[in-house]
Image (cartoon, rainbow, N blue to C red):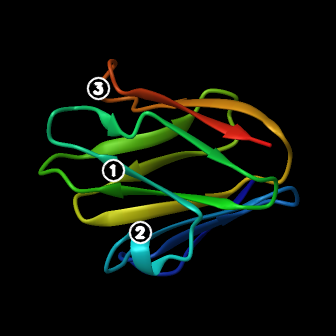
Amino acid sequence: MRVLLVSAVVVAAASMACGSSTSVANSCGSSGANANINATSSLSFSPKTATITNGQSVCWQNSSSVLHTVTDDGGAFDTNLPVGQIFVHTYSSPGTFPFHCKIHSGMTGTITVN
């Protein structure tokens, strides 16, 4: 995976199989993602699970007051998620994809791609 630092505000990552980006944005609602997940101050992802269709995107938003990460258990992505930022990942193949926060061990979730 190749990572390109555009500025202190925007970090974009791209690979041949899928696309991901981290940025400051109004909210996941403005990202165009098909599923939205919040990283909360109660140290949980809400909701913990989401189901999408192959080729669709998931948006994680840090709506808390502390730093989180969004880390794919299979190694597809691992990004810091600072307060107020979003991370969007497009899933290019069907399957079940667990994810977690590396900072807060109890923060886990799963994306199911049909």
- Find residue 38 and name its label: 1
The answer to whether 16 appears left or right of 77 in the picture is right
The answer to whether 34 appears left or right of 7 in the picture is right
Of the residues shown, which amino acid type is indicated by label 1? Asn
- Find residue 104 and name its label: 3
Q: Which SS class for mark 1?
A: strand
Mark toward the start of the polypeptide (2 vs 1): 2
The answer to whether 101 appears left or right of 78 in the picture is left
Q: What residue is shown with label 2?
A: 28
Tag 2–tag 1 contact (CB < 8 Å) = yes
Of the residues shown, which amino acid type is indicated by label 2? Cys
Quadrant (top left, top right, bottom left, bottom right) of the C terminus: top right
Q: Residue at x 35, y 37 (%)?
A: 45
Mark toward the start of the polypeptide (2 vs 3): 2
Which residue is farthest top? 106
Q: Position of residue 69 (x, y in %)?
A: 39, 42
Q: Which SS class for mark 2?
A: helix
Distance (Cα) linking label 2 and label 3: 22 Å
Distance (Cα) linking label 1 and label 3: 14 Å
